[in-house]
Amino acid sequence: MSINKQIPAEQWVEFCDTFTNGNKGRLIVLEVLDPELGVQTPVKDQPLWSLVYDPVGKGNDLTIEIGRNEVAYGHTIDFPNELWQEQDDNGKAIALEIKAEGGSQTIVRLL
């Protein structure tokens, strides 16, 4: 059984830092569900570099960075409005779901 937990927006900066520290290097699958473009999977079995939330600098975006020794790919979600974390029974993160304005969803599955 898994547990879904919504992360309040005012905690996103701290959550992203903590999430990065605990999961850097874990392999992920990144899925994007867009109302206009359909389902895309731009990342499969690649290591997480970081999760970065910038509420003011570039206009309220959340970036998922991929790479081993440096950032090789970045996926930016503009104007996110919901962030959910799914955990297993032991409290280990197994997925993130980020919803954004316009109806798109980005899912990060941790392997």
Image (spheres, rainbow, N blue to C red):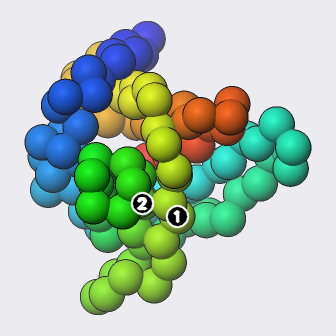
Q: Nearer the viewer, residue 22 or 77?
A: 77
For badge 2, the amino acid type reads Ile
* Label 2 sits on residue: 64
Q: Residue at x 37, y 82 (%)?
A: 71
Q: What count of labels does the image hold?
A: 2
The x and y percentages for residue 59 are 39, 54
Left-right relation of 33 to 2: right
SS category of the residue bearing label 1: strand
Other residues around mark 1 within 10 Å, as few (<14) / some (14–19) / many (≥20): some
Q: Is residue 3 above or below residue 7?
A: above
Q: Residue at x 87, y 43 (%)?
A: 36
For badge 1, the amino acid type reads His
Left-right relation of 34 to 65: right
Q: Residue at x 58, y 54 (%)?
A: 30
Q: Nearer the viewer, residue 20 or 27?
A: 20
Q: Quadrant of residue 49?
A: bottom left
Q: Nearer the viewer, residue 91 or 37?
A: 37
Query: Would residue 109 be seen by someone viewing this image from the given angle?
Result: no
Q: Is residue 56 above or below residue 100?
A: below
Residue 67 disc label = none
The x and y percentages for residue 44 are 62, 64
Query: Would residue 69 be seen by someone viewing this image from the given angle?
Result: yes
Q: Residue at x 40, y 68 (%)?
A: 65
Q: Is residue 60 above or below residue 104?
A: below
Q: Earlier in the sequence, mark 2 or mark 1?
A: 2
* Label 1 sits on residue: 75
Cβ atoms under marks 2 and 1 closer than 8 Å:
yes
Q: Quadrant of residue 57?
A: bottom left
SS category of the residue bearing label 2: strand
Other residues around mark 2 within 10 Å, as few (<14) / some (14–19) / many (≥20): many
> Where does the N terminus fall, quadrant-wise?
top left
